[in-house]
Amino acid sequence: MKKLLAMSTLAGLLSIATVAEASAWTRYGTFYGPRGVSTVRVTGGCGYGYCSRTAVRTGPYGNSYVRRTTVSRW
């Protein structure tokens, strides 16, 4: 009985995690300039009253810039 309860709880937690991931998104961009190619990858999502966004920009020389933002509705 304990094993069944533990498995049910685990299945419930996994289904909640799947719902939270359903609002996730990703965007990509490639830019061509006089010095080479730059890329940007932006990911984000919302769940449990919070929304977050992460942007990673990589320049033509391989330098990267990361910016993370999180907001709460409370």
Image (cartoon, helix red, strand yellow):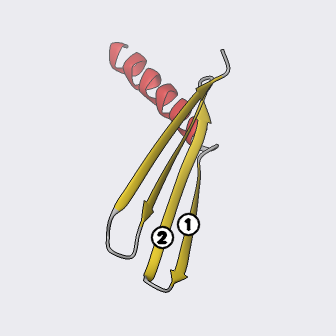
Which one is nearer the viewer's eye here, 49 or 39?
A: 39
What residue lies at 32% left-to-right and 70% top-to-bottom? 62
Image coordinates for residue 68, horizontal then vertical, percent? 47, 41
* Label 1: which secondary element: strand
Disc 1 or 2, which lies upstream in sequence? Answer: 1
Q: Nearer the viewer, mark 1 or mark 2?
A: 2
Relative to 40, 5 lies left or right: left
Residue at the far right in the pictured view: 73
- Which residue reaches farthest bottom? 34
Write down the residue under mark 1.
Answer: 28
The picture places residue 25, in percent across and down from the top left corner, at: 60, 52
Above or below: residue 50 compared with residue 1: below
Residue, x 41% and y 50% (percent of image)?
66
Determine which residue is flagged by label 2.
Answer: 39
Quadrant in which the N terminus appears: top left
* Residues tagged 1 and 2 counted as in contact (Cβ below 8 A): yes
Number of marks in picture: 2
**Residue 62 falls left or right of residue 70:** left
Q: Label 1 sits on what residue type?
A: Tyr
Image quarter where the C terminus lies is top right
User: In which quarter of the view is residue 50 placed?
Assistant: top right
Quarter-wise, where is residue 6 in the image?
A: top left
Residue type indicated by callout 2: Thr
> Regarding mark 2 in the picture, which secondary structure is present there?
strand
Is 53 drawn above or below residue 73 in the view shown? below
Give the camera-side residue of 53 and 7: 53
Residue 13 position, x and y percent, is: 48, 27
